[in-house]
Amino acid sequence: MNRESFKLWKYSIELITKGQQRSVDAKKNIIALFFIKGISIAVSLVLVPLTINYINPTQYGIWLTLSSIVVWFGFFDIGFGNGLRNKFAEAKASGNQYKARVYISTTYAVLILIFLVLWVIFFITNFFIDWSRILNAPRDMAQELSKLALLVFSFFCLQMIFKTISTVLIADQKPAKAAVLDMASQLLALLIIVILTLVTRGSLILLGLTIGFTPILVLTISSFFLFRNNYKQFAPSFNYVQFYYARDIMKLGYKFFIIQIAAIILFQSSTIIIAQLYGPEQVTSYNIAYKYFAIIPMIFSIIITPFWSACTEAWIKNDLAWIKTVVRKLQYIWLILTMSTILMLIVSRSVYRLWVGEEILIPVSVSVSLSLFVIINGWNTIFTQLINGIGKIQLQLYSAIWCSILNIPLAIVLGRHFGMSGVILSTIILAFINSIWITMQYYKLINNTAKNLWAK
């Protein structure tokens, strides 16, 4: 290593290691997350054409629509995931190890009860659901889709319980370790799908089995290992299950629950609306464009994820100067990512052609709409992440309810007039309205001028 290289290396190390410990931890996590998420993004991009080739574009559209419906049930954890995230961070920051362990144990117990009941209800009602009609699929696929729905939902319920270990890692300001679990699941799924393409014919059942089973396997092994070692003092135990503390988690958790439901309606209903208005083939086109532009939110998520729990700690310790500094830096990063989004839009047509070939056509209007949404949503993410960490989310709750009520009828009306881009336009309008009040609330909170609803 020459002298100049050594100086650059030394400067880089100093840049990472200087500052408050909270900032140092965040920077280390961001660097690790870029590497880990980079692999995850690459895997997800490879999975798209591989999966389409394994089945076909129509079946892939059906799979995406069904998956988005099942994801809706993830919010029946009644906000316990995010509630645990804040409460665990608060307990650990206060040095209350006992309370932290009670929160984890109680969360596991409540989630097992919730998703066991949901699974039984789904198992019974699934006999009476015509999935071919809901997914706008061929009638001869009805029986196959019924089996697929039950399979996917069963794995999903297990995943919602076992992913508590990821919540604990993130709450402990170790999001990079949580991201490793996701990456491992994706790599394993990729490997199995490659094998399936070589030894089997295209099958939605085998695809669902693969994508459903892999995260369960990874989460089960990692939970066993971490609670036996690094997090032994927080390991879940029946002796630490106290349903009284479930109410403590729920005080904040139920708000996250409603916000999450509203968010899924706002962001995930597009695939169902497009499937109903234009058929599952168009869902494939929309999803490819969505995955392409989702690279920017993924990058921003890598950068901003460590700051939720860090802001919880900073707020408890009244370190408002640190929060202000973080926001300013995140705004500069948002500007850079905005310019990157515009560049991605300019080259999008060429990228689509190289990525998935000429068979799948993606309208320019869809790409323009998604790029605009990504820019507005990125700005909102800065403040929602920090306000979520602080826990002042009452205003966000009310806004989320109104947006969820307005989105579907507005998306249908605009979709009929402007095509797929009209469906996205509905989300853009509502996201822009949110950007106004959420920016105002942050500045009121950070300057200690928030009153009434702004301070709740």
Image (cartoon, grey):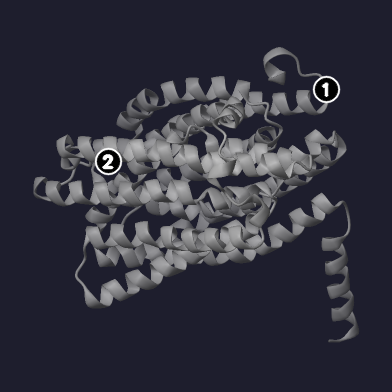
Residue drawn at x 23%, y 58% as measured from the top left: 205
Location of the C terminus by quadrant is top right
> Outermost residue, bottom direction?
1
CA–CA distance in space, label 2 to label 1: 47 Å
x, y percent for residue 287: 38, 50
x, y percent for residue 389: 69, 36
Location of the N terminus by quadrant is bottom right
Question: 121 or 329, which is in the foreground?
Answer: 121
x, y percent for residue 26: 75, 53
Q: Which mark is residue 286?
A: none
Q: Amino acid at mark 1?
A: Asn
Q: Which mark is residue 448?
A: 1
Q: Amino acid at mark 2?
A: Ala
Answer left or right for 359 relative to 424. left
Structural crowding at the residue carrying mark 1, measured as other residues with C-alpha within 10 Å and reported as few (<14), some (14–19) or many (≥20): few
Q: Is residue 358 visible?
A: no
The residue to which callout 2 is attached is 275
Is 232 drawn above or below residue 261 in the view shown? below
Structural crowding at the residue carrying mark 2, measured as other residues with C-alpha within 10 Å and reported as few (<14), some (14–19) or many (≥20): many
Q: Earlier in the sequence, mark 2 or mark 1?
A: 2
Residue drawn at x 75%, y 41% as measured from the top left: 96
